[in-house]
Image (cartoon, helix red, strand yellow):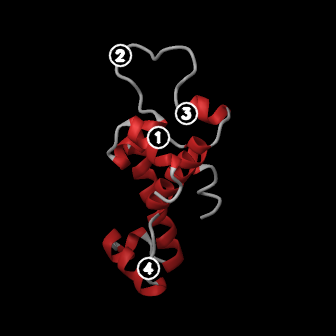
Amino acid sequence: MSVFLYACESWTLNADIERRIRAMEMTCYRRLLGISYKDHTTNEEVSRRIENAIGPHVDLLTIVRQRKLKWYGHTTRSSGLAKTIMQGTVNGGRRRGRQKKRWDDNIRKWTAFELRNILRKAEDREE
């Protein structure tokens, strides 16, 4: 899993990528348990078997979200190129039409705060 999670902090998660993460996780679980798709075992059954085998665990999508939030706090507290790029203080504009989802759009959605409140909370490491 560490190979899969390498540099996941930089991903912009949209619905398609989230679906692929869940599918890859299920594929790994099925391979670990020796379950073939020909067995017609549901994902809920596979999850239940994994939980019985290893106990409660955190799914990959949650780990990716936690890592993104930690990275956001880390770069917000620093002063460097990553902070400048992430906060959008680089000159230029966005394209016309429907905008693609940005990296910080994920952060806004998960925290349910406005950008200025997110920046204020990120300055406090414990919060």
Q: Sequence-wise, which precedes: disc 1 or disc 3?
A: 3
Residue identifier under label 4: 50
Q: Amino acid at mark 1?
A: Leu
Which of the labelled discs sits on residue 86, or is there none?
3
Q: Amino acid at mark 4?
A: Ile
Q: Amino acid at mark 2?
A: Gly
Is 102 or 123 nearer to us in this picture? 123
Q: Sequence-wise, which precedes: disc 2 or disc 1?
A: 2
Q: Which one is in front in this view, the residue at disc 2 or the one at disc 4?
A: 2
- Tell me whether the residue at label 3 lies in contact with that at label 4, contact meaning CB atoms closer than 8 angstroms: no
Q: Sequence-wise, which precedes: disc 1 or disc 4?
A: 4
| Residue 49 in view of the camera | yes
Residue identifier under label 1: 119
| CA distance for labels 2 and 1 | 28 Å
Q: Which one is in front in this view, the residue at disc 1 or the one at disc 3?
A: 1
Q: Sequence-wise, which precedes: disc 3 or disc 4?
A: 4
Whole-percent x, y for residue 118 in the image: 42, 42
- Tell me whether the residue at label 2 lies in contact with that at label 4, contact meaning CB atoms closer than 8 angstroms: no
Q: Secondary structure at mark 4?
A: helix
| CA distance for labels 3 and 2 | 22 Å
| CA distance for labels 1 and 3 | 11 Å
Q: Residue at x 35, y 69 (%)?
A: 43
* Residue closest to the far bottom: 52
Q: Sequence-wise, which precedes: disc 3 or disc 2?
A: 3
Q: Secondary structure at mark 1?
A: helix
Q: Secondary structure at mark 3?
A: helix
- Check the image and report above or below for 116 versus 125: above
Q: Secondary structure at mark 2?
A: loop
Q: Amino acid at mark 3?
A: Met
